[in-house]
Amino acid sequence: MVTRTHELSDADVDAIFHALADRTRRDIVARVIEREQSVSALAERYAMSFAAVQKHVAVLQKAALVRKERDGRQQIVHAELERLRRAQQLLDRYEQLWRHRVDRIASILDEEGP
Amino acid sequence: MVTRTHELSDADVDAIFHALADRTRRDIVARVIEREQSVSALAERYAMSFAAVQKHVAVLQKAALVRKERDGRQQIVHAELERLRRAQQLLDRYEQLWRHRVDRIASILDEEGP
DNA sequence: CGTTCGTGTAACCATATGGTTGTACGTTAG
DNA sequence: CTAACGTACAACCATATGGTTACACGAACG
């Protein structure tokens, strides 16, 4: 039986890994997991312009790793942990490929006999 | 006790996720996990030039997700599964962050009493 | 009401990316 | 020895990325 997780398109996976391929963005994800916060609160932590941080958040949002929710004039950034879990499951598939391969080789060796 | 995995630098993590942020490269990883094979054997499977595939392999190699071993005039590409495991462990840390946060909130609520 | 705050967006820049073609070079098959 | 093979690498191109500054706009404080 296949564990049915909402399937991700190749473009989704591209977006997720691309979003995670930047130190600042990984840091933002970690921060908002710890505590959701506004874009400007995030921007204060980094030695770059507000606009740059805003762009990073936009990349994370495009990958659906975070979502923004307006609260008055602030935009609060929340983590979407489910997406990170999906990425992990993707990597897990490679392990499964590997195990399958090992099994396959073992069974071939068994057939050959001692 | 902390599970000691050889620590990855930020640059390493950048390289790993960047390498995985491309469909062709993910496909190459899957193929060489199934069965190690030459660069030209890989190149046959894709609708792009040999040089392009060669570049993709180079990106994977820079991220240490694969290694090449020369066999005569062929260059055989092998998977480095350990690196994929590391990437998975990285994603797992976000889960741990999340659990820690939930625990923290729960204990605050406990303190407050009913 | 005006002003400040938080955000969004556009224009711009340097560099990286993903692709191409062409060329060079060592290795192996005939 | 020669030809073909597998690989490496350079030059080139279009587009994307990660950063900047400047400006526009709605919400909220006073």
Image (spheres, coloured by chain):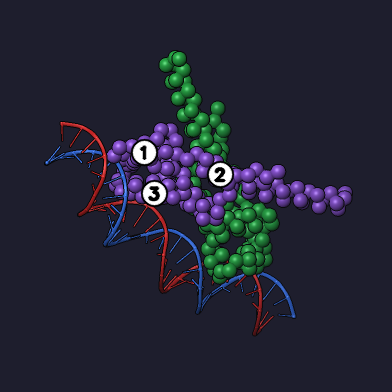
Chain colours: A green, B purple, C red, D blue
Please determine if labels 1 and 3 lie on a single subunit.
Answer: yes
Instruction: Specify the farthest residue to the right.
Output: B114
Q: Kindly indicate the quadrant of the structure image that contains residue A105.
A: top left
SS label for mark 3:
helix
SS label for mark 1:
strand
x and y, in percent, of residue A54 in the image = 56, 64
Please give the name of the residue rendered at 51% of the width and 52% of the height, measured from the top-left corner.
Answer: B12
x and y, in percent, of residue B50 in the image = 30, 45
Question: Callout 1 environment at 10 Å: few (<14), some (14 to 19), or many (20+)?
Answer: some
What chain letter is assigned to the residue under label 3?
B
Viewer-nearest of discs 1 and 2 = 1
Q: Earlier in the sequence, mark 3 or mark 2?
A: 3
What distance separates the C-alpha of mark 1 from that of mark 3?
A: 13 Å
Residue named by callout 3: B58
Front-most of residues A75 and D3: D3
Residue type at mark 2: give it: Arg
What chain letter is assigned to the residue under label 1?
B
Front-most of residues C26 and B21: C26
Question: Callout 3 environment at 10 Å: few (<14), some (14 to 19), or many (20+)?
Answer: some
Checking the image for residue A60, the label placed there is none
Q: Quadrant of the N terminus of chain B?
A: top right
Q: Is residue A5 left or right of residue C17?
A: right
Residue named by callout 1: B76
Residue named by callout 2: B86
What distance separates the C-alpha of mark 3 from that of mark 2?
A: 20 Å
SS label for mark 2:
helix
